[in-house]
Structures are given as C-alpha cells and as structure tokens.
Image: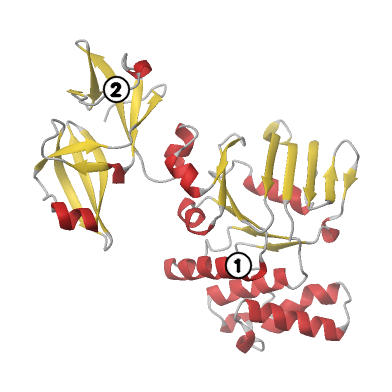
Amino acid sequence: MANVRFDDITFRYGANTVLEHFSLEVESGKIVCLVGPSGCGKTTLVRALLGLIKPETGSITVGDRVLFDAKKRVNVPAEKRNIGIVFQDYAVWPHMTVLENVCYPLKKQRRPKEEIKQRAKRALEQVHMTEYANHLPNQLSGGQQQRVAIARALVVDSDVLVMDEPITNLDAKLREEMLLEIRMIQKRLNATILYITHDQQSALQLCDKMAIMEQDGTLCQYGTDEDIILHPANRFTFEFIGVSNFIPLKQDAGQLALDCGEMIPYPDAVPQEVQGGGYELGIRPNDIVFDGASPLRARVDSRVFLGSEYNYFLSIGKKQIRVQQSMLDARTKGVAEEGETVGVRFLNARFYPLKKGAETA
C-alpha cells in the first residue's frame, strides 16, 4: 500500500468553486476519514483521485506514481490508477455469484485463470466470505454484500482503497459490525484506506486520522480523533465533531453574564479578550458536572438512561442545554431527578466570537 498526496487541487463546476488550492497527505497504512457536511467537496476529491474528473490545478500522487499533474499535463486513465473503490450501494452484480463478482475485475484484466482463482479465494478469506462463494447477492444480508464489495476491491491488489459512505445503507447493528470488519481487514493487510463520510460517529470509531472539511471545501483540521476532540482548531470543528452547547456571553452592569433569556452572572474566570462580552461559551455535554456548591443553577427538564450514561436536558434561565453523565459519576455522586434544581459547573469551556445574528434561547 502507498501514501496519497493531493497538492494544490482546484476544481470548479462552472462558476461554482468546489475545491480551491486543496492539499492533503494520507499516510501509508492508515485509515484516514474525510469528514464534512454534504456538499463540501468530499466526493469531488475522490472523483479526482479516481480519474473521473480533471482538476484545473495541482497534482495527485499515490506512492511514487504521479496520477495527475496539471502543469506537466499528466492524467493517468481511471482504469490504470490501481485504486479500489467500495460504494455506498454495494454495486455487486445481482446475476453473478459471490465468487464471480470477486473474479470480475481480474477477468476484465485478462489475468490467467489460476491466478484469478487464487486471488479471489484469498480476497474472500480476508473478508470471511469463503463459505458464501456460490451464493447470489439476494441470498446475502446487507453487511455480507458489502463484504463482497470490499473483497472485489481488494482482489486487484490496489495501492489504495477508497470507501465512499460504505455503511450508510446498513442498520445500526450492521454498521457497528462493518466498522469492526473494515478495521480488522485494514490491520491484516496494512492497507491505506481513504474513508469518505459525513457520519462523524463512524469516523471517530474507525479512523487513525481525520481530515475535517468545511462547507466551502477548505481543510480546517487534520489529526487524530483525540487531537480533534480535545484540541479543535476552530468553532466549526468543535461544533461539527461531537455534541456541543453554546451560550452567549455579554456584559451586564459591568459583569460578564450568560445570556439565557435573562442575564445570569458567569462565575468562572475567562480569557482577557472575552471579558468584554461578544463571545459564546462552548461546552461539551460530558464537560458539565453537577456540583451543589456552584452558584450556577439549572432545572432538570428530562433525564434518559442510555445504558452507559444518563442524558439530561437542563434549563439555565430560558436556555436549554444538554448534559451527559457517565455511569461512574452517577454511581459515585448520584443522579439528578426531573424537576429538581441543581448546581452545575463547566469544565474545559471554550470561547468563540459571537456568531452574527446569534439569538438567545
């Protein structure tokens, strides 16, 4: 497997600029999730890598191979790029058996029959589908069909494997299973996988690194999931990855206050630039703890037990926020009851300039 490098990629659909001077390097042997809202350019980037569209500027390399270079006029045809692709809708041939589906790419390459047989067998072993070799797709579950699609992508010994929303059509249990399957396959093969999704939860479960794209197609952060959760580069990353609460901070009678439909004094220290107001406090639900000694009071509107944690909605003034309490915290400190007034304390609060037109709740 090999690394993938996008360097200064620009692509436009008419007057609409999708990607402009976009650069990213996907390390060899890693699963990198490209995450962003719908329409941010994720699929356009993949289509450029696959050779299905031609960027205006920049270059794309896989390992030592230059697949595209606008300046040098290099544009390797799609069928010669040696990149495996797994689509959202499986795209397995319904009239072919599992084995025939996996053999198909090698037959198109006119490989020797014995080589086709051995490669197909190995690919099916890698995805644990050997016993289903003679089944038709309509005899398989959605997860099994997706494994066939992965085997078909693996059979040609691709330099890189691209997965474009491969588990979206599966139910929740199968999604969990497929994420584990993909991770195990990657570890067995030391494969380089570029995984495209708008599902942040899947990305966090699967990836070695995440590339976060904003709506305008810019790359706003690249790093491990821990880096991105604990050290978000900007408000977009903080808001897009994970659940977050935002409360406006304003000056009220010479004191910094939370604007919750009524002005509530903010009890904690803030950076110098925040003291004049005009900011929003950003806080994760699991960074809000119950503390009877805190002057910041909230009413418990609802509580739901989710198995591994409790999920609350609290009201501070007229502003509703979400709080998550771990089972360990619940067992040691107790749970809050609906209708109860509790003290809350904010941990790891972040501060961002107030959004234009931001409203109080």
Amino acid type, label 2: Leu
As drawn, which residue projects farthest toward the top? Answer: 254
Q: Position of residue 305 (x, y in %)?
A: 22, 59
Q: Residues within 10 Å of mark 2 (few under 14, many from 20)?
A: many
Residue 268 pos. (x, y %): 24, 26
The quarter holding residue 87 reads bottom right
The residue shown at (86%, 85%) is: 113
Disc ID at residue 187 = 1
Q: Residue at x 69, y 45 (%)?
A: 25
**Viewer-closest of 175 and 267:** 267
Which circle, 1 or 2, is nearer the viewer?
Answer: 1
Whole-Å distance between the Cαs marked 1 and 2? 47 Å
Q: Is residue 193 left or right of 358 when viewed as pictured?
A: right
Residue 196: % across, % down: 60, 53
Image quadrant occupied by the N terminus:
bottom right
Q: Nearer the viewer, residue 112 or 54?
A: 112
Left or right: 201 with respect to 351?
Answer: right
* Residue 96 seen in the current view: no
Coloring applied to the structure: secondary structure
Rendered residue at 85%/60% (across/down):
80
Residue 60 seen anywhere in this rendered image of the structure? yes
Amino acid carrying mark 1 in the image: Lys
Q: Position of residue 185 (x, y in %)?
A: 61, 70
Horizontally, residue 118 falls left or right of residue 195, namely right
Location of mark 2 (residue): 249
Looking at the image, tell me whether mark 1 or mark 2 is earlier in sequence order.
1
Q: How many marks?
A: 2
**Against 117, is 31 above or below?**
above
